[in-house]
Image: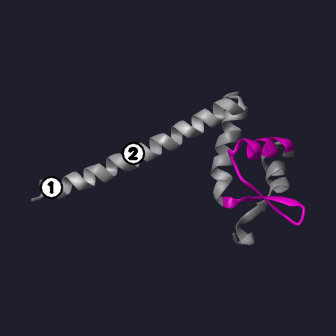
Amino acid sequence: MRQEHLIAAQTLCTHYNIEISFVATLNQMGLIQIEIIEQEQFINQEQIGNLEKIIRLYNELHVNLEGIDVVLNLLNKEKELKNEVTSLKNRLRLYEND
C-alpha cells in the first residue's frame, strides 16, 4: 500500500473530534483497518467515507457499535444485490434484442 494514500489516525481524530480509542475499537471490530508504520497509526483514505458514516451513525443517531456493524453489513448486502440486479437486467436485454 502506498503511503501517500494514508492519513494519520490522530489527524482524523482531531478533525472529526473523536477519541483515538474509538478508532482502535473500530479496528478491533473490523469496521476499519489501521496501518501501523513506525509506531504511528494510519487509515487509508479510501476508508474515510466509511469512517464518516460510522461517526454519523454513532453520534447523530446514537447507534451502538454492534448496531453499526449490522447497518454496514446490510448496506453492503444491498449494494451487492443492486449490482446483481443490474447484471441480470443487462443479460436479459441481450436475449430481448434477439
Q: Is residue 93 left or right of residue 61?
A: left
In primary-sequence order, the first of circles 2 and 1 is 2
Q: Secondary structure at mark 2?
A: helix
Residue type pointed to by label 2: Lys
**Looking at the rendering, in which quadrant would you find the C terminus?**
bottom left
For disc 1, the neighbor class at 10 Å (few under 14, some 14 to 19, many from 20) is: few
Which segment is the magenta one? 21-45
**Residue 82 numbered mark, or none:** 2
Q: Find residue 95 and name its label.
A: 1
Residue 41, relative to residue 77: is it above or below?
below
Residue in the picture at 85% in, 54% down: 10
The local crowd at label 2, few if under 14, some if 14 to 19, many if 20 or more residues have their Cα within 10 Å, is few
Which percent across, then down, holds residue 15?
80, 50
Q: Number of numbered discs present? A: 2
Residue 9 tag number: none
Q: Observer-nearest residue: 7 or 14?
A: 7
Can you say whether 58 is above or below 92 in the image?
above
On the image, which quarter does residue 64 sit in? top right
Above or below, 2 relative to 28: below
In reply to whether residue 34 is colored magenta, the answer given is: yes
**Residue 17 percent location from the top left of the image:** 82, 44
User: In front: 28, or 20?
Assistant: 28
